[in-house]
Image (cartoon, rainbow, N blue to C red):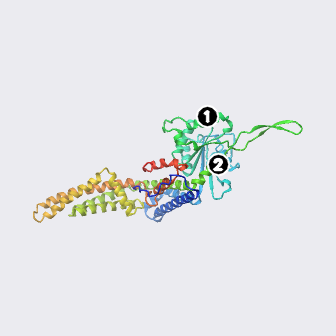
């Protein structure tokens, strides 16, 4: 669909008060919820027409996407933020999760691969019942076969609202590639430098600086400082190694004991809590909308593929009707009006065929976008049709005085019919492409609400880091 011009003010110039920020988050959350509910109501027809074999085929093909839409709305209603930890084997992902919760719930140990599959636990930070977090622990990215690993990572990352990527010391090539892949999911990401207790202060700082200055990767061509800002790199010691402690007893004897220091995760915990406080509800809303948008796009794409033959027949039928109507009509102005009405009817008929919602207003916006994005080709068609229509009208008026003018009328009518038929076919083919985007634009379309949120995020938030990437993905003008 055509991209609407946002009327929302850009609220990025300056910091908001906590009250204003809270109201804005609730507005984002409520708009996202309304968008998802509208989307689900749009596609409810796929469950109401099971007696039709064509709808049954579409319903079966789209079952996964419809389930995603339902589960996304359910997750949004619950208001639970999901934080997923990724990393290679023995980086201490489970230990980081345990340290955040303040208790050892997830299994850890000296052997590689203690975590064999994604596991989730609930965390109520600081006992605040208003903030519900689900922590997701994942297996080491290097202990699963490539394809299975990639699929697992994509699925968990898709469900997550925030990603923790745990490393130990200098980052490896495998870690860098995994980090780039996770960054492409366009989710907020914090790089957790774990086990800092194993490094002297000087080495620790050197590694920290190296993480920010990592060289370019040949595949992505990006540097790590472009993937992550300094604020998104945190140093922790989730499960410090035991230290030998000298103990002096009252009788003067001295013994040595092993004592485990407390975890050093306060900075990470505070960063997460600050993020949840400042933009947690907006983050939930944005991620839900992105998932819904992707599901809608998949629904539209599959539906277009399944009904391609029917769509081609429909386009050719409208092209013939439009050509015939224009050829028989003697008035040039009515030719243009009739041709436009036929194009709009074709677009709405295609949308109905694909079971995609579209109002007359949206059809008109799409028609204008197709008209002006065709490089002047369709505008030329309208102009040529109008000129031929004038010639045809003149021939029709003159036919009474000179019957031979009827041949001129016929020639102009045939030429105009050919131009009109071609225009209808071009509009139909272009509409098929645009309809693959689904119904993500419009007053409550997922892309519309995403754009509203992106226009309102403040510069000093983690969501602002994703703003440019998401706008580019949506083909929106750069800031």
Percent x, y for residue 106?
68, 48
On the rendered image, what quadrant is the N terminus found in?
Answer: bottom left
Q: Is residue 262 visible?
A: yes
Q: Which residue is mark 1?
A: 206
How many labels were placed on the picture?
2
Local secondary structure at mark 1: helix
Of 60 and 128, the residue lying toward us: 128
Badge 1 crowding class, 10 Å Cα cut-off, few under 14, some 14 to 19, many 20 or more, is: few
Q: Is residue 171 visible?
A: no
Q: Give the Cα distance between marks 1 and 2.
A: 23 Å
At x 28% / y 55%, what residue is drawn? 423
- Whether residue 402 sits left or right of residue 316 in the image: it is left
- Whether residue 349 sits left or right of residue 33 in the image: it is left
Q: Residue furthest right?
A: 251
* Vertical relation: 476 (above or below) 171: below
Badge 2 crowding class, 10 Å Cα cut-off, few under 14, some 14 to 19, many 20 or more, is: some
Residue 246 shows which numbered tag? none
Of 232 and 69, the residue lying toward us: 232
Percent x, y for residue 404?
11, 60
Quarter of the view holding residue 307: bottom left
Percent x, y for residue 421?
27, 57
* Vertical relation: 228 (above or below) 339: above
Q: Residue furthest left?
A: 402
- Whether residue 433 sits left or right of residue 27 in the image: it is left
Percent x, y for residue 476?
43, 51
Quarter of the view holding residue 127: bottom right
Local secondary structure at mark 2: helix
Q: Which residue is mark 2?
A: 269
Contact, mark 1 vs mark 2 (Cβ under 8 Å) = no
Quarter of the view holding residue 200: top right
Of 376 and 402, the residue lying toward us: 376
First in residue order: circle 1 vs circle 2: 1
């Amino acid at each position: 669909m055509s991209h609407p011009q946002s009327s929302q003010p850009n609220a990025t110039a300056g910091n908001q008060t906590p009250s204003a920020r809270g109201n804005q988050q609730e507005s984002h959350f409520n708009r996202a919820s309304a968008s998802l509910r509208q989307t689900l109501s749009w596609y409810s027809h796929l469950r109401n027409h099971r007696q039709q074999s064509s709808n049954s085929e579409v319903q079966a093909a789209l079952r996964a996407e419809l389930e995603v839409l339902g589960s996304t709305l359910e997750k949004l209603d619950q208001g639970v933020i999901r934080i997923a930890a990724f990393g290679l084997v023995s980086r201490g992902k489970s230990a980081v999760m345990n340290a955040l919760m303040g208790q050892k719930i997830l299994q850890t140990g000296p052997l590689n691969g203690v975590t064999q599959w994604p596991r989730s636990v609930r965390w109520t930070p600081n006992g605040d019942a208003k903030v519900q977090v689900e922590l997701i622990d994942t297996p080491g990215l290097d202990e699963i076969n490539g394809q299975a690993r990639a699929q697992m990572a994509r699925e968990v990352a898709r469900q997550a609202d925030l990603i923790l990527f745990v490393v130990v010391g200098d980052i490896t090539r495998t870690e860098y590639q995994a980090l780039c892949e996770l960054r492409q999911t366009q989710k907020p990401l914090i790089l957790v430098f774990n086990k800092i207790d194993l490094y002297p202060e000087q080495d620790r700082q050197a590694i920290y600086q190296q993480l920010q200055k990592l060289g370019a990767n040949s595949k992505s061509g990006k540097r790590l400082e472009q993937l992550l800002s300094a604020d998104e790199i945190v140093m922790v010691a989730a499960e410090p190694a035991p230290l030998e402690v000298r103990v002096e007893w009252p009788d003067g004897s001295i013994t040595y004991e092993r004592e485990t220091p407390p975890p050093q995760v306060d900075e990470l915990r505070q960063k997460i809590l600050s993020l949840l406080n400042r933009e947690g509800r907006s983050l939930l809303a944005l991620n839900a909308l992105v998932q819904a948008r992707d599901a809608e796009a998949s629904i539209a794409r599959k539906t277009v593929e399944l009904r391609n033959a029917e769509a081609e027949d429909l386009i050719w039928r409208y092209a013939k009707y439009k050509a015939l109507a224009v050829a028989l009509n003697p008035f040039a102005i009515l030719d243009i009006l009739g041709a436009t009405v036929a194009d709009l009817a074709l677009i709405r008929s295609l949308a109905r065929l694909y079971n995609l919602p579209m109002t007359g207003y949206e059809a008109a916006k799409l028609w204008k976008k197709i008209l002006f994005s065709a490089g002047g080709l369709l505008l030329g068609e309208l102009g040529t049709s109008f000129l031929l229509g004038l010639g045809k009208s003149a021939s029709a008026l003159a036919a009474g005085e000179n019957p031979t003018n009827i041949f001129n009328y016929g020639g102009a009518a045939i030429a105009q019919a050919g131009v009109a038929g071609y225009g209808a076919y071009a509009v139909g083919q272009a509409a098929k492409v645009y309809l693959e985007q689904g119904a993500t634009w419009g007053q409550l379309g997922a892309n519309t609400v995403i754009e509203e949120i992106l226009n309102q995020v403040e510069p000093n938030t983690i969501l602002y880091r994703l703003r440019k990437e998401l706008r580019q993905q949506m083909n929106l003008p750069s800031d």
